[in-house]
Image: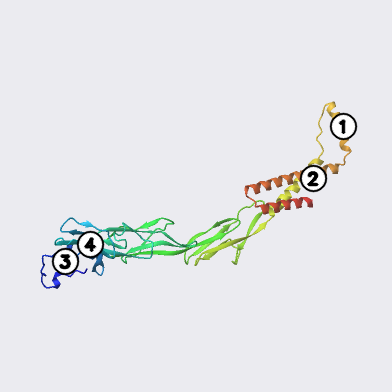
């Protein structure tokens, strides 16, 4: 039912014995009061907006009501819609509504703002003289390789205040006093992830960069054993420098190319051959002359007679082969340990063993 204020009649309407009056007023004159006449035989309800305009920058929001000057009863704070109150018609009554002034906070630059304390009306409007803190994340992920990072904030078009960059967590403003409407601006910069791939060496410069900046990616070759690796340039790039500059206008990935260096294998082969040759030379050296007891001399003569039956070249050749085989076996065992420790991949382990066996067969 729609109530009509008495003022619209020009005078108080007459009230019969079967009628009662209802007076509706607002504390602190937040709206115009009115009085209506009700029939005692009928049921009535007052429908009051939760919020109504105060001026272009503020509004009133309903907090509580009182019937016949009894203590106020608080109601749920809601931004929009109507609060409905059933009115008894057993006699005349009065209703007083209590409302509070609210101001808005406008947020620019992010959709992730969190108010503390939260708005009593669950929006961006806050009660007069309350203090509000705004928290937002330092990092806003756009996708796996793109994000935005918080850099500045300002209050009511004041100069931007720089924010120390953080990789995680949230930034909180100083408390904002709600003595009027406010506008808060947050500044974010778009960042892209620059990645690098390399099978060998140590990479530097990988990470997040502001859009438009230049990233410098470098790779430091490692001392790989037994197969070395020489940097052969960046895939798709000109030049052989181990550093490359990348313009960051989107997510980037660069790949380092390498070529195998078998110089260490050659050194191992030389060591094997040299060791075998040295052993053969050592075998050819004459034994030192020493004085021995007669019995031992006779034994030595018998051994010497046996040795004379074998060609010296054959002795040296057999010894050199045995030593070569021993060194080869130890080299293979060392390669096996490298593969077990993860220094060599299965493919390179097999390739190196094949190379060593081939060198041995060539000899």
Q: Is residue 221 above or below residue 189?
A: above
Instruction: From the viewer's perspective, tell me whether residue 1 is left or right of residue 277.
Output: left
Question: Residue 33 lies in what quarter of the image?
Answer: bottom left
Residue 302, label in figure: 1
Q: Could you say which is closer to the camera, residue 1 or residue 223? A: 1
Front position in the image: 80 or 20:
20
Residue mark closest to the camera, 4 vs 2 = 4
Query: Is residue 168 or residue 227 the one in the foreground?
Result: 168
Q: Of residues 169 and 333, which is closer to you in this image?
A: 169
Residue that appears at 41% across and 55% down: 169
Q: Position of residue 154 (x, y in %)?
A: 34, 63
Q: Disc 3 versus disc 1: distance between alpha carbons? A: 146 Å
Image coordinates of residue 89 in percent, x first then y, are: 17, 62
* Mark 4 residue element: strand
Do labels 4 and 2 touch, CB within 8 Å?
A: no
Q: Residue at x 14, y 70 (%)?
A: 6
Q: Nearer the viewer, mark 3 or mark 1?
A: 3
CA distance separating discs 4 and 1: 131 Å
Of pointers 3 and 4, the one earlier in the residue sequence: 3
Rendered location of residue 266, percent (x, y): 71, 53
- Residue under label 3, please give it: 38
Disc with the residue nearer the chain's start (2 vs 3)? 3
Q: Which mark is residue 85?
A: 4
Q: Residue furthest top?
A: 294
Circle 2 sits on which residue? 321
* Upstream in sequence: badge 4 or badge 1: 4
Q: Dot 3: within a 10 Å radius of its alpha carbon, few (fewer than 14), some, or many (20 or more) residues?
A: many
Q: Nearer the viewer, mark 2 or mark 1?
A: 2
- Depth check, mark 3 against mark 4: the one in front is 3
The residue at the point 87 percent across, 35 percent down is: 306
Q: Position of residue 135 (x, y in %)?
A: 36, 58
Q: CA distance from mark 4 to mark 2?
A: 110 Å
């Amino acid at each position: 039912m729609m109530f009509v204020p008495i003022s619209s009649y020009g005078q108080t309407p007459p009230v019969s014995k079967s009628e009662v009056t209802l007076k509706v007023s607002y504390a602190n004159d937040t709206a115009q009061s009115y009085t209506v006449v009700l029939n005692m035989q009928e049921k009535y309800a007052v429908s009051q907006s939760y919020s109504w305009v105060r001026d272009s920058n503020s509004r009133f929001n309903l907090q509580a009501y009182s019937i016949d000057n009894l203590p106020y009863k608080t109601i749920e704070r809601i931004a929009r819609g109507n609060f409905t109150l059933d009115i008894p018609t057993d006699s005349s009554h009065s209703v007083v509504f209590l409302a509070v002034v609210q101001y808005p906070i406008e947020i620019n630059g992010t959709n992730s703002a969190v108010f503390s304390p939260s708005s009593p009306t669950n929006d961006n409007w806050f009660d007069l003289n309350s203090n509000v803190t705004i928290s937002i994340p330092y990092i806003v992920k756009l996708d796996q390789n793109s994000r935005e990072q918080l850099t500045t904030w300002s209050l009511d078009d004041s100069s931007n205040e720089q924010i120390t960059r953080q990789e995680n967590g949230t930034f909180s403003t100083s408390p904002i006093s709600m003595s009027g409407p406010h506008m808060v601006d947050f500044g974010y910069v778009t960042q892209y992830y620059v990645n690098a791939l390399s099978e060998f060496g140590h990479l530097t410069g990988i990470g997040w960069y502001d859009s438009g900046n230049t990233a410098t990616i470098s790779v430091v070759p490692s001392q790989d054993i037994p197969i070395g690796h020489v940097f052969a340039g960046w895939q798709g790039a000109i030049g052989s420098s181990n550093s490359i500059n990348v313009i960051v206008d989107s997510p980037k990935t660069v790949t380092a190319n390498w070529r195998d260096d078998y110089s260490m294998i050659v050194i191992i082969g030389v060591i094997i051959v040299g060791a075998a040759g040295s052993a053969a030379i050592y075998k050819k050296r004459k034994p030192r002359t020493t004085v021995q007891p007669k019995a031992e001399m006779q034994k030595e003569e018998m051994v010497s007679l046996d040795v004379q039956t074998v060609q010296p070249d054959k002795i040296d050749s057999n010894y050199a082969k045995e030593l070569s085989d021993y060194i080869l076996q130890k080299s293979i065992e060392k390669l096996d340990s490298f593969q077990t420790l993860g220094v060599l991949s299965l493919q390179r382990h097999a390739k190196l063993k094949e190379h060593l066996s081939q060198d041995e067969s060539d000899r």
